[in-house]
């Protein structure tokens, strides 16, 4: 059978079959599902039905893939980081350049897909939660392009910490709504967005930001992000003649990781590695690594690993990279960890910062601090491997948004190294 999108030549590398989907209740192994108030069940079911119907329609993919190509800039390159590989002295390191996407990270793959679905369902408004503001910006961007009203829920504490992204969302025409409940951070923004959505789902679509939450979000967000791994798989075969030995991605809620790793699920020779923010943070707080230290529990409508304190309250998380500060993780990654397909790794704030500097200096690529965690682990893994082997690292985003944080942490050191300002 010819490819259903034969008139989009570049689309032939995308496999549109849904592989390893969840069961009809949205379970990946024992994880996932739909644990939500009765009033949420119907709108979630409507999204599920609309998603399966859209996914089976070539016209949906034609528009989606056309936007991914001409608006987002896909396919993103696969870059052989020769200088970094030489510096590390082990395996060859390849970077999947999601940092080159429009808006600077992988998140727009998902917001384009869900905004198209919203329009197809006849919804005029979209809402979303955001923590660091990246998903808020990616949502406000597509809302501007599709001319949809857009409300972004954001913890008041995050609004304070992420002023540039808040301004970006406003420039794009979105309303940013402060959430004061709980710790006034991401988990509270999700709860508030879900609450508002129940009351407004008649005309409003909720664009969820990561591969977590109640069914069908983990499946849907994964499907919109598998372009990452499908491209990388083809590009690896083209450039090296074989699959990578290891594929590595950082994990907040899990969307860039599942997007990169899922297309390699059946390639048992490829080691799949997820990297959490781990250890002691630079702020002295213990990091929250949901997969490594969490326990099975229900968060935001789905059963997965999450961080709770002794009273069963969801713990706040701390990392220099705000995008990894999610106290839960997507159910499919939890299931892959449980069945042994996924290996877990961690990088501390210090290790991520080191990797940030190394990549910037060796290759002239300034990564996001989230992605720097994957680079740190990828470097460590590559160092113990042979030069003919390959490590594929997902560079989920670019570091522009992190300049303020990095300036505070490294500004003085860099000034000394470069001899300060020279008149
Ligand atoms: C949001 C973000 C992440 C973490 O989110 P996931 O859903 O786990 O991918 C990682 N990297 C970047 C650049 C981000 O913006």
Image: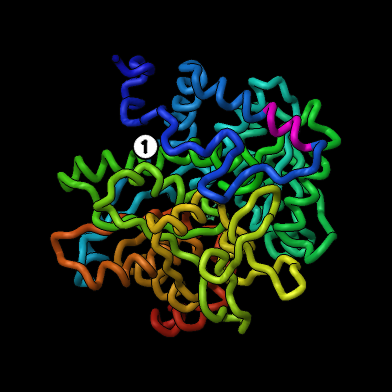
Does residue 161 lie above or below 179 as drawn?
below
Q: Label 1: state its secondary structure.
A: loop
Regarding residue 326, the answer to whether it shows in the image is: no
Residue at 58%, 37% in the rendered image: 111
At 78% from the left edge and 62% from the top edge, which residue is drawn? 184
Determine which residue is flagged by label 1.
Answer: 75
Instruction: Tell whether position 173 is magenta.
Output: no
Residue 123, position in %: x, y? 73, 25
- Magenta residues, as a range? 40-46
Relative image position of residue 207 (x, y in whole percent): 66, 38
Query: Is residue 389 something that shows in the picture?
Result: yes
Place of residue 174 in the rendered image (x, y in percent of width and height, measured from the top left): 74, 40
123 vs 33, nearest the viewer: 33
Number of marks: 1
Left or right of 400? Residue 46 is right
Q: Residue at x 41, y 75 (%)?
A: 354
Would you identify the image quadrant in which residue 417 lies?
Answer: bottom left
Above or below for 392 versus 204? below
Above or below 37: residue 329: below
Q: Residue at x 61, y 61 (%)?
A: 296
Left or right placement of residue 96 versus residue 18 in this view:
left
Q: Image quadrant for the N terminus?
A: top left
Residue nearest the viewer, comparing 174 with 62: 62
């Amino acid at each position: 059978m010819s490819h259903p999108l034969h008139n989009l030549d570049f689309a032939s590398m995308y496999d549109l079959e849904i592989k390893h989907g969840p069961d009809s209740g949205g379970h990946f192994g024992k994880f996932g599902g739909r644990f939500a108030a009765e009033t949420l069940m119907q709108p979630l079911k409507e999204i599920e039905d609309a998603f399966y119907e859209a996914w089976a329609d070539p016209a949906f993919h034609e528009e989606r893939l056309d936007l991914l190509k001409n608006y987002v800039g896909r396919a993103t390159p696969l870059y052989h980081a020769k200088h970094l590989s030489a510096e590390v002295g082990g395996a060859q390191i390849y970077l999947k350049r999601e940092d080159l996407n429009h808006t600077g990270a992988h998140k727009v793959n998902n917001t384009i897909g869900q905004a198209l679905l919203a329009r197809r369902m006849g919804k005029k408004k979209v809402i979303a939660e955001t923590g660091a503001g990246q998903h808020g910006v990616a949502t406000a961007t597509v809302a501007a392009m599709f001319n949809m009203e857009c409300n972004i829920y954001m913890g008041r504490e995050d609004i304070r910490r992420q002023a540039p992204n808040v301004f970006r969302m406003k420039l794009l025409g979105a309303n940013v709504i402060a959430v004061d409940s709980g710790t006034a951070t991401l988990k509270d923004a999700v709860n508030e967005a879900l609450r508002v959505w129940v009351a407004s789902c008649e005309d409003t679509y909720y664009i969820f930001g990561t591969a977590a939450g109640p069914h069908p979000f983990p499946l849907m967000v994964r499907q919109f992000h598998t372009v990452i791994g499908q491209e990388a798989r083809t590009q690896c075969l083209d450039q090296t003649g074989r699959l990578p030995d290891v594929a590595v991605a950082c994990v907040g809620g899990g969307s860039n990781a599942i997007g990169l790793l899922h297309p390699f699920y059946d390639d048992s020779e490829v080691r799949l590695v997820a990297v959490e923010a781990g250890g002691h943070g630079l702020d002295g707080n213990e990091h929250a690594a949901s997969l490594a230290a969490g326990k099975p529990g229900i968060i935001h409508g789905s059963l997965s690993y999450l961080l709770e304190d002794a009273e069963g309250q969801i713990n706040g998380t701390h990392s220099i990279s705000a995008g990894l500060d999610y106290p839960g993780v997507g159910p499919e990654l939890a299931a892959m960890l449980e069945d042994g397909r996924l290996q877990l790794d961690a990088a501390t704030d210090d290790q991520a910062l080191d990797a940030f500097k190394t990549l910037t200096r060796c290759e002239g690529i300034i990564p996001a601090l989230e992605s720097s965690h994957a680079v740190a682990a990828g470097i460590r893994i590559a160092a113990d491997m042979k030069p003919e082997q390959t490590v594929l690292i997902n560079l989920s985003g670019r570091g522009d948004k992190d300049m303020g944080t990095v300036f505070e942490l490294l500004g003085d050191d860099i000034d000394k190294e470069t001899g300060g300002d020279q008149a």
